[in-house]
Each structure stands twice: as C-alpha cells, then as structure tokens.
Image (cartoon, grey):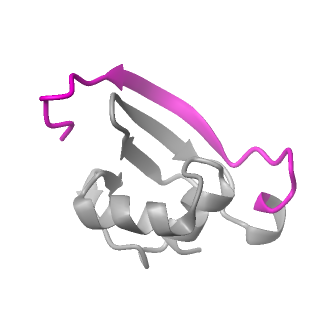
C-alpha cells in the first residue's frame, strides 16, 4: 500500500493530501529514510512522523487496505514519542 494512503487509513493523518504534503516536506520517514508518497508500506516497517510539536515513531502491524477500512482496525503500534521544540528540526 502507498505510504500516503496508509497514513490516512491508519488515522495518523486526517487527509491524504495532508499526508502527501508532509512527505514532500520531509516530515515522514520510512525505515529511517526520506521517502515518497508512493513508497510501499509493508508489515514490520517503521514510520516516523514529525508533527508540529512531537515526533511519533510507529511500527506497521497491518498494511491490508480492507482491514484498515474497518473502524476499529489496529494497524500500528507506537514505539516512541518525543517532544520537539518549535525552533528545533525533528530529524
């Protein structure tokens, strides 16, 4: 599944276009590397997302679109979360 679609369906980002913008800005990393919206997400991948005031690190548990569309689907588990100051670069 595409990274931007996964972020939206996993409810890590509210809109797919917002996910695409975050990825373009370099605020999302897949397995520690910069990536594209079209990057393939698989089970076991590590995704880091830099929000405005925090960085969230998650492990992908499920990348099946049919399962992710269910309201209570568990698709990721949190590995780490750290605060980031507004003037600090997250990566």
| Quarter in which the N terminus is drawn | bottom right
The number of numbered discs placed on residues in the rendered structure image is 0
Lateral position of residue 39 relative to residue 78, left or right: left
| Of 62 and 50, the residue lying toward us | 50
Return the x and y of residue 43 as percentages of the image width and height: 59, 57
Return the x and y of residue 21 as percentages of the image width and height: 36, 65
Is 77 rendered above or below residue 7? above
Residue lying at 43% horizontally and 49% vertically, measured from the top left = 47
Residue lying at 24% horizontally and 58% vertically, measured from the top left = 26
| Of 22 and 3, the residue lying toward us | 22
Asked whether residue 18 is in view, the answer is yes
Return the x and y of residue 15 as percentages of the image width and height: 57, 61
Residue lying at 43% horizontally and 34% vertically, measured from the top left = 56
Magenta stretch: dominant secondary structure: loop
Return the x and y of residue 45 as percentages of the image width and height: 48, 54
| Quarter in which the C terminus is drawn | top left
Residue lying at 55% horizontally and 31% vertically, measured from the top left = 78
Asked if residue 24 is among those painted magenta in the image, a careful observer would answer: no
Q: Quadrant of residue 69?
A: bottom right
| Of 46 and 6, the residue lying toward us | 6
Residue placed furthest toward the bottom: 38
The residue range painted magenta reads 68-91
Lateral position of residue 29 relative to residue 64, left or right: left
Is 42 rendered above or below residue 38? above
Q: Quadrant of residue 72?
A: top right
């Amino acid at each position: 599944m595409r990274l931007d679609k996964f972020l939206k369906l996993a409810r890590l980002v509210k809109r797919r276009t917002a996910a695409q913008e975050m990825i373009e800005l370099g605020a999302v990393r897949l397995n520690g590397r910069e990536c594209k919206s079209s990057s393939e997400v698989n089970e076991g991948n590590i995704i880091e997302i830099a929000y405005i005031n925090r960085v969230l690190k998650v492990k992908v548990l499920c990348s099946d679109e049919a399962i992710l569309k269910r309201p209570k689907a568990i698709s990721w588990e949190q590995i780490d979360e750290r605060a980031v100051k507004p003037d600090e670069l997250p990566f």
